[in-house]
Image (cartoon, helix red, strand yellow):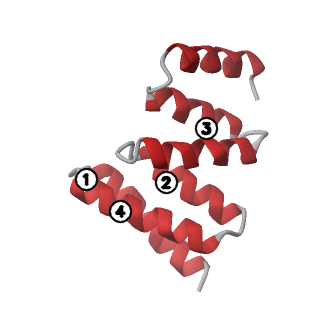
Amino acid sequence: MNEERIKQLERFIQEDPNDPFLKYALATEYLKNNKRKSAELFEDLLKTHPDYIATYYHAAALFTEFGEMEKAENIYTSGIQKAQALNESHALKELQSAYINFQFENE
């Protein structure tokens, strides 16, 4: 975890708290060494910026890693629906593929 990068991202968020990319970047930075903090940030993004599609893939994978399968599945399916509604075909394919793998691995 790059402490300086985290501090920089946190400063940027203070300056622009409504920028979903900054929160997403911070959440992915925390994935390296503080997964609970990352989960908190992903959950906030899902609530406050549900159209930020990239969140769904990483959030679902993280909750799968935590063993929170129902939550992970809900995030995958919500992300797939959101990607379809926003016509985000690349994200849709990635989410569908990840969800199929999730289902296969957790039968």
- Three-letter amino acid code at the position of disc 1: Ser
Element marked by disc 3: helix
Question: Which residue is tagged 4?
Answer: 80
Q: Which residue is mark 3?
A: 28
Amino acid of disc 4? Ile
Q: Quadrant of the N terminus?
A: top right
**Rendered-image quadrant of the C terminus:** bottom right
Q: Are the residues flagged by discs 1 and 2 in contact, CB closer than 8 Å?
A: no
Q: Contact (CB < 8 A) between labels 3 and 1?
A: no
Left or right of 13: which side holds 54?
left
Q: Residues within 10 Å of mark 4 (few under 14, many from 20)?
A: many
Q: What amino acid is found at the position of numbered circle 3 in the picture?
A: Thr
Q: 10 Å neighbourhood of mark 1: few (<14), some, or many (≥20)?
A: few
Image location (x, y in percent) of residue 100: 45, 73
Give the mark nearer the N terminus: 1 vs 2.
2
Mark closer to the chain start, 3 or 4: 3
Q: Earlier in the sequence, mark 4 or mark 2?
A: 2
How far apart are the alpha carbons under marks 1 and 2? 14 Å
Q: Earlier in the sequence, mark 3 or mark 1?
A: 3
Q: Is residue 23 above or below residue 12?
A: below
User: The residue tagged with tag 2: helix, strand or loop?
Assistant: helix
Identified at 61% across, 41% down, the residue is 41
Q: Earlier in the sequence, mark 4 or mark 1?
A: 4
Taking the spot 69% from the left edge, 62% from the top edge, the residue there is 65
How far apart are the alpha carbons under marks 4 and 2?
Answer: 9 Å
Residue 48 point in image, percent of width and height: 45, 42
Identity, as a three-letter code, of the amino acid under mark 2? Tyr
Q: Which residue is mark 2?
A: 57
